[in-house]
Image (spheres, rainbow, N blue to C red):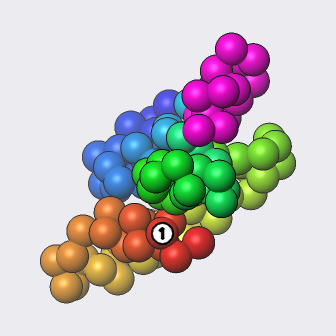
């Protein structure tokens, strides 16, 4: 628990991103939420044709399996602090980079 608290204090963007990924993954496990998640958290031609443009960004926090979630969280929580430390010299926050990477992905 100390790690989570320390992560949030030093890198709120990382902790909020990780928490959002976990919450969305848990919601995918609850069948009544599937239609909502399909409309908002999957990037598809159908969603784009229906002007559901937030799905492009929101799909970046949606994971198909526990293994997918674990690997992505490991990468985020391993590389994130290093990137944050590199950005600290420029005074740029981490969240614009996270949003940009999500959009590019």
Please tell me whether the stretch drawn in magenta is mainly helix, strand or loop: helix
Say which residue appears at 50% left-offset and 31% top-offset: 1
Q: Is residue 38 left or right of residue 5?
A: right
**Residue 24 seen by the camera:** yes
- Quick check: is 37 in the magenta stretch? yes
**Residue 77 seen by the camera:** no
The residue carrying mark 1 is: 103
Which quadrant, please, contains the C terminus?
bottom right
Q: Position of residue 78 (x, y in %)?
A: 58, 65
Q: Which residues are magenta?
A: 24-39
Q: Is residue 6 left or right of residue 91?
A: right
Q: Is residue 101 left or right of residue 62?
A: left
Q: Is residue 85 above or below residue 21?
A: below
Say which residue appears at 65% left-offset and 60% top-offset: 45
Q: Quadrant of residue 91?
A: bottom left
Instruction: Report the residue that reaches farthest toward the front.
Output: 49
Q: Position of residue 46 (x, y in %)?
A: 65, 52
- Quick check: is 17 in the magenta stretch? no
Say which residue appears at 74% left-offset and 57% top-offset: 71
The secondary structure type at the circle numbered 1 is helix
Crowding at dot 1, Cα within 10 Å, few <14 / some 14-19 / many 20+, comes out as some
Q: Is residue 50 left or right of residue 64?
A: left
Say which residue appears at 41% left-offset and 73% top-offset: 100
Instruction: Report the residue that reaches farthest toward the left.
Output: 91
Q: Is residue 82 above or below residue 12?
A: below
Q: Position of residue 89 (x, y in %)?
A: 21, 84
Q: Position of residue 80 (x, y in %)?
A: 48, 67
Q: Is residue 19 above or below residue 34?
A: below
């Amino acid at each position: 628990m100390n790690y989570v608290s320390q992560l949030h204090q030093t890198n709120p963007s990382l902790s909020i991103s990780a928490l959002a990924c976990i919450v969305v993954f848990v919601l995918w496990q609850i069948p009544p939420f599937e239609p909502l998640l399909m409309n908002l958290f999957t990037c598809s031609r159908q969603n784009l044709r229906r002007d559901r443009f937030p799905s492009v960004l929101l799909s970046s926090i949606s994971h198909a399996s526990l293994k997918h979630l674990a690997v992505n969280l490991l990468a985020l929580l391993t590389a994130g602090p290093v990137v944050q430390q590199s950005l600290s010299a420029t005074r740029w926050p981490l969240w614009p980079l996270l949003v940009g990477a999500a959009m590019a992905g």
